[in-house]
Image: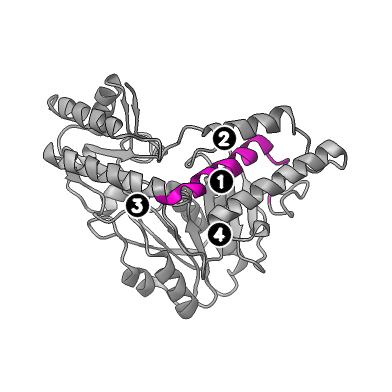
Amino acid sequence: MQAYLDNAATTAVLPQAAQAAARAMTEEYGNPSSLHPMGRQARELLQKARAQVARAVSCAPEQLVFTSCGTESINTALRAAARKNRHTGRHIVSTAVEHDAVLNTLKALAQEGFEVTLVEPERDGLVSAEKLCAALRPDTILLSLMAVNNETGAVLPVEEAAAAARKRSPAALVHVDGVQALCKQPFSLENVDLASFSAHKIGGMKGCGALYIKKGLSIAPLLLGGGQENGLRSGTEGMPQIAAFGAACEVRMQNRERDAAHMCALRQRLLAGARALGAAVNSPEKAAPHIVNLSMQRGRSEVYIRALGERGVCVSGGSACTRGRASHVLLAQKLPKGNIDAALRVSLCPESTAEMVDLFLDALGQAARLF
């Protein structure tokens, strides 16, 4: 038996999404910008997918721009927001636990003369709304935070921070990284100007993302060219990926409450079993239902990952983008070195089973005996 439990890195493509992509490649393969019937057919498919994703995001279809990935959506949002209001201030607020796509873009903006304040998390991984609000200043022009942390599952106070930004920093635009929240952990777009999403975290294909832009907000595009996506993302739309994204959103939204309850039950089973083995839990008690970060507090993550892999279990040591580096998220939580060195991220999806969790726990117990 195999147990794939690395769904925060990527998910299997849902059958409905694969079917939608196949149709876009073999039957409805026209260019959406073409005027002939095949082009018109592709445009209709594009409109359908945009409406499907918009329903999952809870916005109007015209507020969504399709991109190549969550990273592109994040880069577009942060760079455009910072440069749009630089005449009113140069202060940016974010957190120390953001995805590298955010942190590295902010680092680049700092080199351009912007001042970046990163709010530290609490020891359990949660980020205090009070600390976020206190970091806001009259010259703050951008607040960026994730809805759900990709390494610990911590849920960040998006609604409170966004409302505070409206009051304390009138010129600030608010960006939310919703990649790990889409179809799993609802959050409100009230007071949010920009939000980034990715298809392959919910059963869509790699190579597709979306950017929500609040109605009336004008931003500069990251890519220039033929003016697709209302001039905000030039380049011929990747219709197989976009069609699959729409189909995946539709499936996930139809079953969201049932899937969330299923993953919550699996999470509790995982936590109880891991604690029985003596593992420390690096995630907050109240977190998104699909991510658990834990540690046997001895040994190293990569050894555990290899040993688990030999037993048919796939997990990670943290974000797939870190490639073996110590987790900046766990470092920011100021956890003991043993917790960080041996950290494992177990991430679920609606198709995960109790048998997979039990296989992981059995393999973890065996792997821990190596140390």
Between marks 1 and 2, how big is the CA–CA gap? 9 Å
For this rendering, which residue is in front, 65 or 75? 65
Between marks 1 and 3, how big is the CA–CA gap? 20 Å
User: Which residue is label 1 attached to?
Assistant: 250
Query: What number is the disc on residue 288?
Result: 3
Query: What number is the disc on residue 58?
Result: 4
Of the 4 image quadrants, the one containing the C terminus is top left
- Crowding around mark 4 (Cα neighbors within 10 Å: few <14, some 14 to 19, many 20+) is some
Between marks 1 and 4, how big is the CA–CA gap? 12 Å
Which element carries disc 2, helix, strand or loop? helix
Q: Which numbered disc, 2 or 3, marks the residue closer to the eye?
A: 2
> Which callout, 3 or 4, points at the residue further toward the start of the chain?
4
> Which callout, 4 or 2, points at the residue further toward the start of the chain?
2
The residue positioned 34% from the left and 44% from the top of the image is 263
- Placement of 367 over or under 71, stated as above or below: above
Of the 4 image quadrants, the one containing the N terminus is top left
The residue positioned 47% from the left and 41% from the top of the image is 201
Can I make out residue 126 in this image? Answer: yes
Q: Which residues are magenta?
A: 233-257
Which element carries disc 3, helix, strand or loop? loop
Specify the principal SS of the magenta part: helix
Can I make out residue 110 in this image? Answer: no
Which element carries disc 1, helix, strand or loop? helix
The residue positioned 50% from the left and 38% from the top of the image is 203
User: Which residue is label 2 attached to?
Assistant: 16
Q: Are marks 1 and 2 in contact (CB under 8 Å)?
A: yes
